[in-house]
Image (cartoon, grey):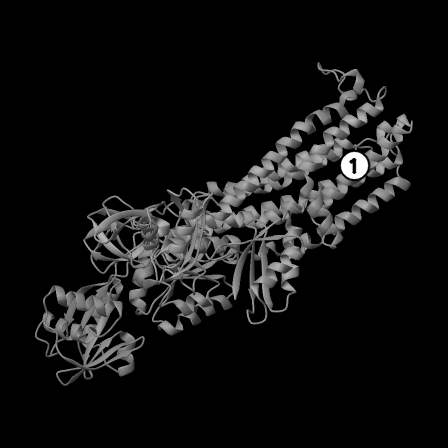
Amino acid sequence: MRNTLTISGMTCAACAKRIEKVTGKLAGVAKATVNFATEKLTVEYDETALELSAIEEAIAGIGYGVVSENKKNEVTIPILGMTCAACAQRIEKAVSKIDGVTLASVNFATERATVAYDPKLIKLSQIKEAISKLGYTPLDIERKGAVDEDRVRREREINSLKKKFIVSAIFGVPLLYIAMSSMLWWWPFPTPRILYPMQYPLNYAIVQIILTVPIVIAGRRFYSVGFRAFIQRSPNMDSLIAIGTSAALIYSFYSTYQILIGNFGAVEGLYFESAGVIITLILLGKYLEAVSQGKTSEAIKKLMGLAPKTAIIVQDGHEMEIPIDEVEIGHVIIAKPGGKIPVDGVIVEGHSAVDESMLTGESIPIDKKPGDKVFAATINKNGVIRFEATKVGSDTALAQIIKLVEDAQGSKAPIAAMADIVSGYFVPVVCVIAVIAAIAWYFLGTPPAGWTHVQFALTIFIAILIIACPCALGLATPTAIMVGTGKGAENGILFKGGEALETTHKLNAIVFDKTGTLTEGHPEVTDIVIANDSGIRDENHLLQITASAERSSEHPLGEAIVRKANIECVDFLKVENFQALTGLGIEAVIDGSVFYIGNRKLMKERGVPLGNLEKESDRLAEEGKTPMYVVLEDKLVGIVAVADVLKKSSSDAIKSLKAMGIKVAMITGDNKKTADAIARQVGIDIVLAEVLPQDKSNEVKKLQTEGLRVAMVGDGINDAPALAQADIGIAIGSGTDVAMESADIVLMKSDLMDVPTAIALSRATIRNIKQNLFWAFAYNTAGIPVAAGILYIFGGPLLNPILAAAAMSLSSVSVLTNALRLRRFKVNRVSD
């Protein structure tokens, strides 16, 4: 069983590592991965040995929360017209009696009914109709779980952090001003004389306490989470803040006590402003971080915004507009000109043209008739159609795409492994460094003029704890992956995970399948050649024989011959003993004679000489056409040549890939001459011709043994083994079928320029990740020694803990800001 849980309460990469460690140790868990940026835990476990509730309990046991997601078909229906509790009881009783309703609860105070039901037995519209018959008015539903819960939760978190920061800033600014007043003699608004530290030290201390308490309350979560994690021997970023500021507060309260008993010199030992301003700055950093993280998932929001909010259904012969959440399988829906298709379905009445560009990238609207499929969020251009809903909610093609992007954004890339390892040991190591440095300076150091040894050591201790930032390490990789995969989705490029996104930047060879990938996949008959003394009357006679045999074939070239026969109104002959010869052609008996139709390999295998048609065959192949040889018994009687038109984007894509330093190969079952001719047209140098379908993966493997990182580009169906063998499988398929298991990347459009775009995006994302990791490691590598007093040894300044807090807050924000630069990624058509 594989489940994804939303985790609350994580504040840094150390938290994510801890959850991974605890859940990974549970009996029955095969794999546990936590993405700090998306706040998701993906866990694979044996459901016979372990229940999901046990995993949730383990997470709760170490101080984190699991956000519950409602997966039942449960809705909340606002109801107008209730006047007393008896009304609520009446509705509850009536709805409970409906067959298919498993729960009905009506709250008179909120005027809402919560109903759980089985959509196979009862439709929501019938439940609402039953309420209407009682004389009340049911309004549009509020489906639990239908709202973007993550977005609502994140907005709530942002608002909470904003309020906490405002509160702490209101008290923090005057706190800092009073504490620094002796240094601001030039300031035009002097501190009241009653607060002068030398004359009135007790007033000075008490006012600072009064201003500090609200700040500590605003940042209380740092203490509750931080100390709990520390006690459980898994300290995190909150632990560093809690220990550092607590040390400052405890020493400040001790100094206040000294003032009370008459030691007025202790006024120099007040650090209330350090604790207060540190908390204020960190709350500001957390607020900015939350805002930036929200922006990383904008691609998902855009995709979600494509779906319409309402649908017009036909109920009892009447048209009725209902919210999209109320549409159920089996509903007959009306789509009017210019409107969006609300859900996936099959047309039952009407004709129209539908713009499916948001799914397939095809700008020309597609004609639709009864029996054809339509997809959610596509646009009905002209004509009124009625269709039956076949997929709703999370089952639509659009929802599949959104899930694919969400899964990719929640996955980890191998490049994050080092940061994960460091994050696991980072906080305990920082605590040890802080203690050792403080003790060393206390006993061996010379404090600055006017400082005591305690003040000196305490400043070092606090600065080290506060400047260390595991957040930057934890956010460096996942935020870039979120933005990169989101940007890919905007361009119709769906990466299936962080590993696929990372591996793509290493590619140095790409193999294209020919039919349907480099070409349009709609071959047409171009030439019909008859051999001398063949017994074939004319071109139509040869077409008749060939098309009759090919009618039972599913090969695209055979289908092209049958289409040509239909256009020419040729009568088909009776065929017996049809047999497909894999990778060669077909065999069939027509009017008692055995015919073989296939490629040059078939001729060699059957020992059939080409005779006077050899030159003609070579000419056709050199023109990029595929000769289909027609053999009667053991004699070649003619050739039917078929050609497929190259896609307009093929040569541009090859040119771009070459400019990026990537080797390009083409793989095809065509004969060498035909393959070479097509390769010349698009500029491909490496040609793998006459390859049987089952051997394509072996050809990919050969390239890999040469030390190349290979991508295979195919249609995702016939090329599945080769796609799986390649380092990266790229499936060019319709955006309406995104669940291509063999591929690592799905290109929703048929534009081959998306291949170099995918590689360019991967390179840009990995470059961004490396920048983030460099900054995160460099910041901590430089910041911790500076906080430990390395500059002071050489006559430089000590790092003020307040400046350390500002630097720590900015470090994670800077990593997020850098990741957001990927949103400006532009497609470069010629090079990276």
Q: Write the residue at 72% across / 29% down.
A: 211
Q: State whether residue 569 is above or below residue 207.
A: below
Residue 67 vs residue 597, the one in the foreground: 67
Residue 251 vs residue 13, the one in the foreground: 251
Q: Could you say which quadrant of the image residue 654 lies in?
A: bottom left
Q: In this view, does 390 lie to the left or right of 232?
A: left
Q: Write the residue at 30% across / 52% down.
A: 648
Q: Residue furthest bottom?
A: 592
Disc 1 crowd rating (10 Å Cα; few below 14, some 14-19, many 20+) is many
Report the label total.
1
Residue that mark 1 sits on: 249
Q: Is residue 52 left or right of residue 246?
A: left
Question: Does residue 787 appear anywhere in the picture?
Answer: no
Residue 265 vs residue 203, the one in the foreground: 203
Q: Residue furthest left?
A: 537
Q: State whether residue 443 is above or below residue 648.
A: above
Q: Is residue 659 left or right of residue 807?
A: left
Q: Write the residue at 24% across / 50% down.
A: 334
- The amino acid sitting under disc 1 is Leu
User: Does dot 1 land on a helix, a strand or a loop?
Assistant: helix
Q: Could you say which quadrant of the image residue 600 lies in?
A: bottom left
Residue 502 vs residue 690, the one in the foreground: 502
Percent from the top left, x then y, of residue 802? 72, 33
Q: Is residue 3 left or right of residue 798?
A: left
Question: Does residue 465 appear anywhere in the picture?
Answer: yes
Percent from the top left, x then y, of residue 787? 76, 39
Percent from the top left, x then y, of residue 372? 24, 59
Percent from the top left, x then y, of residue 702? 46, 69
Q: Write the residue at 65% across / 52% down.
A: 15
